[in-house]
Amino acid sequence: MAADETTLDLGIGPEMIEGLEMLSKLEGITDITAMDGPLLTFAGRLVTTLDSVSGITRVDVFECARGWYLFFVPQQPENWAAAGDDLEGALADIPDASCAAEVRAALRQAGVLAGSAGGD
């Protein structure tokens, strides 16, 4: 992957538990190059944005140096994330199975994830 850099607004500071969880997931798959409150700059590129998936306003899908990062922006309460060494691993990190299935279907529709014989 190219060494693109992206700045992401977590919507919450990394000192909060939720912010720390999102930061930890990101640190596991890429290098964070700058932090300024809720703003994180990291090695990765935005591949696509999924709108209105499973009651979630937006899902930003990033390909990072060592994996994939899915950043969820719900209507409320707080943003959250899923990550994995590959896109399937990031999908498996989504805690709600129905949400994961909807994100998987949206990624297929967007052409990011190829259809597979594997189960959802």
Image (cartoon, rainbow, N blue to C red):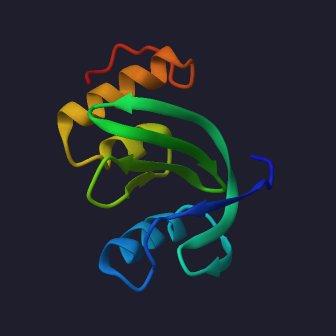
- Depth check: give the residue in front, 64 or 74: 74
Q: Quadrant of residue 117?
A: top left
Residue positioned 78% across, 53% down in the render: 4
When asked about the image quadrant of residue 35, the answer is bottom right
Residue at horizontal 31 percent and vertical 47 percent from the top: 75
Residue 113, given in percent of the width and then of the height, sits at: 51, 24
Image location of residue 84, percent across then percent down: 44, 51
Residue 118, compared with residue 82, is above or below; it is: above
- Quarter of image, res 32: bottom right
So how many labels did they put on this image? 0
What residue is drawn where x is 19% and y is 31%? Answer: 98
Tell me: residue 6, above or below residue 118: below
Q: Nearer the viewer, residue 57 or 115?
A: 57
Residue 80 located left or right of residue 13: left
Left or right of residue 59: residue 42: right
Q: Along the line of sight, which residue is nearer the eye, 24 or 50?
A: 50
In this rendered view, identify the residue nearer to me: 116 or 70: 70
In the depicted structure, whether residue 15 falls above or below residue 116:
below
Which quadrant is home to the C terminus? Answer: top left
Residue that lies at the very extreme toward the bottom in this rendered image: 15
| Residue 19 spot, x, y in % from top left | 40, 73
Residue 89 place in picture, x, y as percent? 40, 45
